[in-house]
Image (cartoon, grey):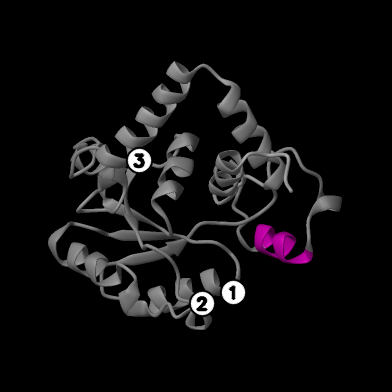
Amino acid sequence: MSAIPEPVVSLIAAMSRLPGIGPRSAERIALHLVQTDSVAVRQLADAILQARERIQFCSTCGALTEKSPCPICDDARRDGALICLVERAVDILSIEKSGTFRGKFHVLGGRISPLDGVEPEDLRIADLEKRLTHEPIREVVIALSTDVEGDATSYYLAKRLARSGLKISRIAYGLPAGSGLEYADELTLSRALEGRREMN
């Protein structure tokens, strides 16, 4: 017989389904919540429900937003000729934190993975092709992961999207800031060398 009451066991199970939370962390969070003031727990539950109910996907780019089109798509100061293609809506947040990209985005919604049953028609490629005909896009920057599926999807997209007047590029991959060469694998070093650029 478990010393943990059934409602807490259920809460632990629910917490452990969240990304980045292992069994021990799920248990600590669940035990913390059941011992916390009920007002604070209710505020947390309300915040979760409100966020889930109010957040939607942008009808243009697929970003997480409260209103559609999202503020990035609506921002006339951003370069509408430059589109960064990402796998998931949360990838936009990572790129935006860098503060270096001033174009717009398009969320693919995954990557091609026949083993997982994900084919090109399951992704938002047709939506991107529509944007290419209706928007003044001159460059698509592919920013997908560097695993097998990410590479395969990137090559597929480069071929499918190829057309006159459209530049298709891929973000460079290399060494993380603050790390040494001794910690880099061969593929990372190879890509860092291939993505090199002239110093001014």
Residue 32, image quadrant: top right
Q: Secondary structure at mark 2?
A: helix
Q: Main secondary structure of the magenta part?
A: helix
As for residue 102 lying within the magenta part, the answer is no
Q: Residue furthest right?
A: 182
Q: CA distance from mark 2 to mark 1?
A: 6 Å
Residue 160's disc is: none
How far is mark 1 from mark 3, CA to CA?
A: 28 Å
- Residue at the spot x=78%, y=55% of the render? 184
Amino acid type at circle 3 is Arg
Looking at the rendered structure, the secondary structure element under dot 1 is helix
Q: Is residue 192 left or right of residue 150?
A: right
Residue 78 falls in image quadrant: top left
The stretch of residues the image draws in magenta is 186-193
In the displayed orientation, state which residue is furthest to the left: 134
Q: Is residue 199 above or below residue 145?
A: above
Q: Residue at x 78, y 65 (%)?
A: 186
What amino acid type should be assigned to the residue bearing mark 2? Ala
Residue corresponding to mark 1: 148
Q: Position of residue 86 (x, y in %)?
A: 41, 57
Quick one: 165 or 98, which is closer to the camera? 98
Q: What amino acid type should be assigned to the residue bearing mark 1?
A: Val
| Residue placed under numbered mark 2 in the picture | 152
Residue found 74% across the figure and 60% down from its top: 189
